Image (tube, rainbow, N blue to C red):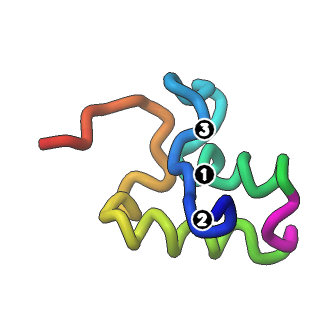
Amino acid sequence: MARTVGVVFPFFQPPPTLTVVGNVMLLTELRRSVPAKQRCSRAGELLDRVGLAALADDREPRRTDR
């Protein structure tokens, strides 16, 4: 089951030094579940899937439940 469940933000408050896409990539880097060359594109695909692709380069936290 762990392979079918994803985490968009592994931290309650994402580290301010990471962009949104960097935060999504962090978990795949830690688990080495996605090859290094594919991490950025895979993270972009996941953000697009949940409607957050436009925020990929943002560093500022914001509400997305509106």
Q: Image quarter for residue 44?
A: bottom right
Task: Tell me if label 1 and label 2 are in contact, CB under 8 Å.
Answer: yes
What residue is drawn where x is 84% and y is 53%? 31
**Which x, y percent locates residue 17?**
65, 29
* Mark 3 surroundings: few (<14), some (14-19) or many (≥20) residues within 10 A: some
What residue is drawn where x is 31% and y is 32%? 62
Earlier along the polypeptide chain: callout 2 or callout 3? 3
Residue indicated by mark 3? 10
Q: CA distance from mark 2 to mark 3?
A: 13 Å
Earlier along the polypeptide chain: callout 3 or callout 1? 3
The magenta region covers 32-36
Label 2 is placed on what type of residue?
Ala
Left or right: 22 in relation to 33: left
* Mark 2 surroundings: few (<14), some (14-19) or many (≥20) residues within 10 A: many
Residue indicated by mark 1? 24
Q: Residue furthest front?
A: 1
Label 1 is placed on what type of residue?
Val
The image shows residue 34, relative to residue 55, as above or below, that is: below
Earlier along the polypeptide chain: callout 1 or callout 2? 1
Which mark, residue 49?
none
Q: Secondary structure at mark 3?
A: loop
The C terminus, quarter of image: top left
**Which x, y percent locates residue 6?**
56, 58
Which mark, residue 43?
2
Task: Tell me if label 3 and label 1 are in contact, CB under 8 Å.
Answer: no
Q: Secondary structure at mark 2?
A: helix
**Which x, y percent locates residue 14?**
56, 29
